[in-house]
């Protein structure tokens, strides 16, 4: 199992819980001081804060489950190292962090607005105070969304590294096709600038309004205290004029009750939410009640200032987004209109970009062009070297054909003429050795030439309908001549009534001869049988070359057909593998093949398949 894919869901959930949990703690810790809340409001809001945090965690869990439901098959596939995945799921995984944060913010807004409803709003909080708490929470939540998004994006990026290259390419092409009609770059930059400014401006307006309201409340409490002590207290026990003073205070918004009971100075709220101030007098105490400053008074001014800041941010973000989109468009056009020749010559920038990131991108593109130029130069050298090699190959083949085969044929011809004359037994044996080695050398030269043609893709065949005996028996005779002195018996067996085969007879004879020579080298005083039997219906003709005796081990079977790769076997058996490799190439050109297997007696048999009247494809 690959850990980044397996643990993605847990990491996404943990990142969100950490970010939003920290937001809740910040709100609980700083809201009373920032908003200048009364102790009664703080105490009454604690149960609601606990339920709000719990509801937010439920929203986060639901948003994570909903967002990742489409990518779970992708994560399961990547966890086991799958090489094929759905490109649409790759796009869904890439979009998951943004969708997750958007759902979280939407859920937090819904939970916050729900607390304004009468059943949920605490009795100690008026509507304005609760709205301020909700707005402060949203402001801090918007700040928390950034680290939550960064953490989620980092976790998703680790998983995206596991996506196969082909699937990533398909996903990019699919995304380009989907977004071709709309360019969201300017809009994304605009949102990136306006959103934080809007939240910060709104939060600042809240804080200023809260402090102004607190200052106004304190000022009115101080005025009421001075009023009660200076106006309603007796002068040398004379309380005349107190009633008129109470009526005058009422006209100014202060309700005053005088009691002869003593009291200590206190400030609180009555059942109607009005501020109640107790002021000691010489003959009792006065209770002054007045309305607290309206929470919404002056809010329009601060909202207007916040709207002005948002408007300025909108204009600035729109301008920056337009300029950045122009630079990206410039870079895109440069890349789209630059061909291979331009890339190899170097970059040709029409205008210097305004933004450093785009300029860095274009410089990186030009540097990449430099890498491609070096690669193209090396490739051109390789092409030139290959062309020179091909020319040398042609010269080599021509030289081998004329400079070696002509002298060899002359040597063999004169040796045959010499053998027809009167010779002693010793001389005749010497002439026979010359003929034998000459034929071996001529066979080796032909094998080398044909192997070179196979490697160059120049070996061709001309299949014709041929009797099996016209292929098998010449191969047996050629093999006997080439294995003279090896004490190996080579025989051929052809079952009567076998169908004709569609082959190039000389080439297939050459291939069978090469297989028989390999079998003879491994036989070691054994027996080699070339056998052609009646094929089953729908099968190709199978010609078996069976080796008795020690045979070929399983480890050496495939090595037999690999030319120039096993020098130790070449020293033991006098072959570099050119013959078997050439034989397989010839048979495969006919649409057949060669198999090797071990017999029950411990020997080895080569199965050579060629097209026949019974079947054009292998059974």
Image (tube, grey):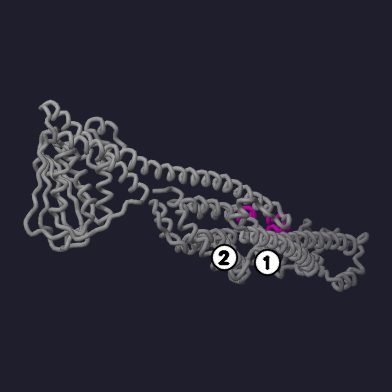
For residue 50, say whether it is visible: yes
Percent position of residue 331, x then y: 66, 58
Residue 273 shown left or right of residue 462 in the figure:
right
> Which of the two residues, 596 or 108, is positioned nearer the viewer here?
596
Placement of the C terminus among the 4 image quadrants:
bottom left
Q: Looking at the image, is mark 2 or mark 1 nearer the viewer?
A: 2
The number of discs equals 2
Residue sitting at x 49%, y 47%: 383
Residue sitting at x 69%, y 52%: 359
For residue 124, say whether it is visible: no
Q: Give the magenta range.
A: 23-40
Going from the N terminus, do you reach mark 2 or mark 1 first? 2
> Which of the two residues, 339 or 608, is positioned nearer the viewer here?
608
Please name the residue that numbered disc 1 is placed on: 131
Percent position of residue 58, x then y: 51, 61
> Which of the two residues, 569 or 322, is positioned nearer the viewer here?
569
Percent position of residue 226, x then y: 87, 60
Q: Residue 33 magenta-drawn?
A: yes
Residue 557 position (above or below residue 240)? above
Q: CA distance from mark 2 to mark 1?
A: 17 Å
Residue 60 shown left or right of residue 530 in the figure:
right
Q: Which secondary structure dominates the residues rendered in magenta?
A: helix
User: Considering the numbered disc 1 on the image, is that residue within a helix, a strand or a loop?
Assistant: helix
User: Considering the numbered disc 2 on the image, is that residue within a helix, a strand or a loop?
Assistant: helix
Residue 477 position (above or below residue 236)? above
Name which quarter of the figure residue 306 lies in: bottom right
Q: Residues within 10 Å of mark 2 (few under 14, many from 20)?
A: many
Please name the residue that numbered disc 2 is placed on: 107
Percent position of residue 178, x then y: 54, 68
């Amino acid at each position: 199992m690959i850990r980044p894919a397996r643990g993605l869901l847990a990491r996404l959930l943990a990142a969100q819980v950490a970010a939003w949990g920290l937001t809740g703690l910040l709100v609980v810790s700083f809201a009373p001081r920032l908003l200048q809340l009364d102790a009664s409001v703080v105490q009454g809001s604690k149960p609601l804060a606990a339920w709000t945090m719990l509801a937010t965690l439920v929203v986060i869990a639901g948003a994570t489950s909903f967002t990742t439901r489409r990518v779970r098959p992708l994560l399961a596939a990547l966890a086991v190292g799958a090489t094929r995945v759905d490109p649409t799921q790759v796009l869904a995984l890439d979009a998951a962090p943004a969708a997750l944060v958007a759902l979280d913010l939407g859920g937090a807004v819904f939970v916050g607005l729900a607390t304004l409803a009468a059943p949920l709003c605490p009795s100690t909080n008026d509507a304005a105070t609760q709205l301020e708490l909700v707005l402060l929470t949203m402001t801090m939540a918007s700040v928390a969304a950034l680290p939550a998004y960064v953490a989620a994006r980092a976790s998703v990026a680790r998983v995206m590294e596991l996506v196969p290259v082909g699937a990533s390419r398909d996903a990019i092409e699919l995304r380009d096709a989907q977004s071709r009609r709309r360019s969201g770059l300017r809009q994304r930059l605009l949102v990136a600038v306006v959103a934080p400014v809007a939240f910060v401006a709104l939060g600042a307006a809240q804080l200023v309004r809260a402090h102004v309201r607190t200052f106004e409340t304190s000022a009115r409490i101080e005025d009421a205290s001075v009023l009660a002590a200076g106006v309603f207290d007796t002068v040398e026990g004379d309380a005349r004029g107190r009633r008129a003073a109470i009526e005058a205070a009422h006209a100014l918004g202060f309700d005053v009750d005088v009691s002869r009971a003593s009291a200590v100075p206190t400030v609180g709220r009555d059942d109607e939410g009005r501020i109640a101030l107790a002021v000691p007098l010489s003959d009792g105490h006065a209770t002054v009640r007045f309305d607290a400053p309206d929470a919404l008074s002056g809010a329009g001014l601060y909202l207007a200032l916040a709207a002005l800041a948002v408007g300025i941010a909108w204009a600035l973000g729109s301008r920056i987004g337009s300029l950045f989109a122009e630079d990206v468009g410039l870079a895109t056009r440069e890349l789209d209109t630059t061909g291979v020749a331009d890339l190899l010559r170097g970059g040709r920038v029409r205008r210097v970009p305004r933004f450093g990131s785009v300029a860095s991108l274009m410089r990186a593109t030009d540097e990449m062009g430099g890498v491609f130029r070096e690669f193209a130069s090396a490739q051109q050298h390789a092409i030139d070297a290959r062309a020179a090699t091909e020319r040398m190959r042609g010269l080599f083949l021509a030289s081998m054909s004329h400079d070696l085969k002509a002298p060899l044929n002359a040597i063999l011809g004169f040796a045959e003429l010499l053998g027809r004359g009167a010779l002693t037994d010793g001389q005749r044996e010497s002439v026979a050795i010359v003929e034998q080695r000459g034929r071996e050398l001529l066979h080796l030269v032909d094998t080398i030439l044909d192997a070179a043609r196979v490697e160059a893709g120049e070996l061709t065949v001309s299949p014709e309908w041929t009797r099996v005996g016209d292929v098998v028996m010449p191969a047996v005779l050629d093999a006997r001549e080439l294995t003279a002195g090896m004490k190996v018996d080579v025989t051929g067996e052809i079952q009567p009534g076998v169908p004709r085969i569609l082959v190039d007879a000389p080439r297939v004879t050459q291939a069978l001869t090469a297989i028989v020579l390999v079998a003879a080298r491994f036989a070691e005083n054994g027996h080699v049988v070339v056998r052609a039997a009646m094929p089953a219906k729908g099968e190709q003709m199978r010609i078996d070359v069976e080796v008795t005796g020690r045979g070929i081990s399983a480890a050496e079977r495939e090595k037999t057909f690999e030319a120039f790769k096993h020098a130790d076997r070449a020293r033991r058996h006098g072959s570099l593998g050119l013959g078997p490799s050439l034989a397989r190439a010839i048979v495969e050109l006919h649409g057949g093949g060669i198999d090797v297997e071990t017999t029950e007696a411990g020997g080895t048999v080569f199965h050579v398949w060629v097209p026949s009247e019974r079947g054009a494809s292998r059974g």
